[in-house]
Image (cartoon, rainbow, N blue to C red):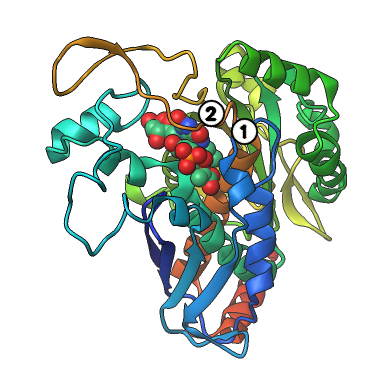
Amino acid sequence: MRYVTAGESHGPEEIAVIEGIPAGLHITQEDVNQQLARRQKGYGRGDRQKIETDQVTFLTGVRHQVTLGSPITLNVHNDDHNNWSKIMAPNTPANDENTLRKVLRPRPGHADLVGGIKYRHHDLRNVLERSSARETTMRVAVGAVAKKLLSEIGVDVHGFVVNVGPAKTDLAQLEQYKTLAKLREVTESFDTRTLDQATDDEIKTVIDQTKKNANTVGGTVQVMATGMPVGLGSYVSADTKLDAKIASAIVGINAFKGVEFGGGFGNAEKYGDQVMDEIFWSEEKGFYRGSDNLGGFEGGMTTGGAIIVRGVVKPIPTLYRPMQSVDIDTHQDHKASIERSDTTAVTAAAVIAEAMVAIELAKAVLDKFDADNIERMKEQVAVYRQETQQF
Ligand SMILES: Cc1cc2nc3c(=O)[nH]c(=O)nc-3n(C[C@H](O)[C@H](O)[C@H](O)COP(=O)(O)O)c2cc1C
Ligand SMILES: C=C(O[C@@H]1CC(C(=O)O)=C[C@@H](OP(=O)(O)O)[C@H]1O)C(=O)O
């Protein structure tokens, strides 16, 4: 399975094309829309989310809500394009009117300056339109298809917020939420209670205060996945390690600057006996572990335990009290450009991280098992599970 996305933040459409999803998978636009709606939630976002109501349309590869095995094209319309139709018009030549809103003062922490230098763009809008996290809409759409595929073999993936700046969610105490069922129960109430309606006082206060200071704030998100068969990915080469692929997928999300598995960076302060996941065996389960300090991976392969990945999200780069920059035309000192911006986007980041983990897990499943037909894939997974449990 592979995919590509296309689209500019204020351009007309966002697109993703996925190749390699087996035939016979039942999927509806509503399956995808549910995930897109989750990505739009979260206290602290700017006004763009009030303009957009992300809805997917299947353009190819699906017939009567069932995949055909051919490339699947997903499409989400940018409602905000109406407000940018002249400036972002793909098919009319540039003139004074439609190039008015040039961006010349690069924002520190954004792709603006380096992107301009690299692509010789003298209007940095040509960089920011694509580097914008608007594109993550399509990664979440692709992730929704991946999650549907994984659900067919009993794999569940769920992302949530650990902290926003200094304010920790009540999910930060991971130990309490070892099972995904329990986690889901708590996060579902949490999604509505805290991040949508922002009644969690501590987080709300941090975000409100940050906004009042014309500043921005980041955080940490966690993704848990349960039900993966043992032995996906491989130790044999650096580029076959599944934990490495997940790490790359997480850091590939806008604003993510760090990733860890299980106990992660905390393991650096511990001793071996506190970190290794000891091995047990029972008739009923086969081999299993008593803990999950290594996040479900050994040698780049799934152990069969829960996969636990965390990612660090830096604060949003655009500040309403802009940082120092330099005008790319005049080379004079100037404050950085300001466009409408979020104060924080950690909730959305959790949903995007979940999608990225789901995509990497789905790819690993489709690399190992039949990728032509979903029923054959499921049969093969079942046979493999039975064999590995009897080892
Ligand atoms: C969901 C989401 C929303 C974001 N919203 C904004 C925003 O409103 N303003 C902004 O300056 N950056 C925003 N960012 C971050 C930038 O897209 C990102 O920092 C920038 O593209 C540079 O990429 P890098 O941080 O990965 O180096 C957002 C990121 C995510 C994940
Ligand atoms: C559009 C989304 O996020 C955008 C990501 C983003 C950035 O620079 O990354 C900047 C902002 O764009 P705008 O100036 O249009 O408000 C965010 O709103 C989205 O998540 O759907």
The residue drawn where x is 81% and y is 48% is 184
Between the residue at mark 1 and the residue at mark 2, the CA separation in whole angstroms equals: 7 Å
* Residue 329 vertical position relative to residue 288 in the rendered view, above or below: above
In the foreground, 267 or 131: 131
Q: Residue 101 at what x, y percent from top left?
A: 30, 37
Residue 153 x/y as whole percent? 67, 70
Identified at 31% across, 49% down, the residue is 87
Q: Quadrant of the N terminus?
A: bottom left
Residue appearing at x 17%, y 51% in the figure: 94
1 and 2 marks in contact (CB < 8 Å): yes
Badge 2 crowding class, 10 Å Cα cut-off, few under 14, some 14 to 19, many 20 or more, is many
Indicate left or right for 38 with 69 as reference: right
Residue type (three-letter) at the residue carrying disc 1:
Val
Q: Write down the quadrant of residue 293 in the picture.
A: top right
Which residue carries the number 1 mark? 346
User: For numbered disc 2, what is the local secondary structure?
Assistant: strand
Q: Is residue 153 above or below residue 278?
A: below
Q: Which mark is residue 313?
A: 2
Residues 345 and 273: in front is: 345
Q: Nearer the viewer, residue 85 or 54?
A: 85
